[in-house]
Amino acid sequence: MKSYIPLIAAASLGLLSACNQNDEPEVVGGPRDPMAAELANAAPVELPPSVKANKQFRCKDNSLLFVDYMSDDKTALLRTEKGGAATTLKAAEAGQPFTAEGGYTIDGAGDKVTITVPGKSAQACHV
């Protein structure tokens, strides 16, 4: 049994000596990017705004409205049903009323607002 140990050690050293001794990895390049110049000269990408606050309002007629205020302070998403389709309202500048085609308006961004939806007059709503 003692005679096999030097044989196994020699075989192990022989296998290890066959490993690649190069410390530098080989870099293989592919074809050049055909859009590299266009991408380098492209305008910066602006990410869409994220949700800043979600509010559920109870209005004067006892209806519920759901508003998501966005981080750009110029966009609000209005839902007339929880989980329903959202209507995007925009403000010309931060602090201005949010409006959308069809007669949607939200005036204010705090806990008390005035909201108008098509088919209804403007009504006071609160959180």
Image (cartoon, rainbow, N blue to C red):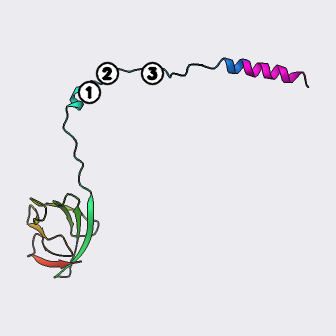
Q: Position of residue 39 (x, y in %)?
A: 24, 31
Q: Is residue 120 left or right of residue 57?
A: left
- From this view, report whether residue 39 is shown above or below residue 78: above
Q: How far apart are marks 1 and 3 (CA)?
A: 20 Å
Instruction: Identify which residue is drawn at 66% across, 17% down.
Output: 18
Q: Where is residue 10 in the image (x, y as percent from the top left)?
A: 78, 19
Instruction: Identify which residue is drawn at 28% across, 69% down.
Output: 82
Q: Is residue 96 left or right of residue 55?
A: left
Residue 114 vs residue 27, the one in the foreground: 27
5 is within the stretch colored magenta: yes
Q: Disc number at residue 21?
A: none
- How many C-alpha atoms fall within 10 Å of the one at disc 3: few (<14), some, or many (≥20)? few
Amino acid at circle 3: Val
Residue 74 shows in this picture: yes
- How many C-alpha atoms fall within 10 Å of the one at disc 1: few (<14), some, or many (≥20)? few
Is most of the magenta stretch helix, strand or loop? helix
Amino acid at circle 2: Arg
Q: Position of residue 57 (x, y in %)?
A: 22, 75
Q: Position of residue 1 (x, y in %)?
A: 91, 25
Instruction: Identify which residue is drawn at 23% across, 51% down.
Output: 48
Amino acid at circle 1: Ala
The magenta region covers 2-13
Residue on which the image places disc 1: 36
Q: In this view, does 19 lie to the left or right of 73?
A: right
Mark 1 and mark 2 in contact? Answer it, CB < 8 Å: yes
Q: Disc number at residue 27?
A: 3
Q: Is residue 8 left or right of residue 65?
A: right
Residue on which the image places disc 2: 32
125 is within the stretch colored magenta: no
Instruction: Identify which residue is drawn at 20% across, 82% down.
Output: 62
Examine the image and state in which quarter residue 7 appears: top right
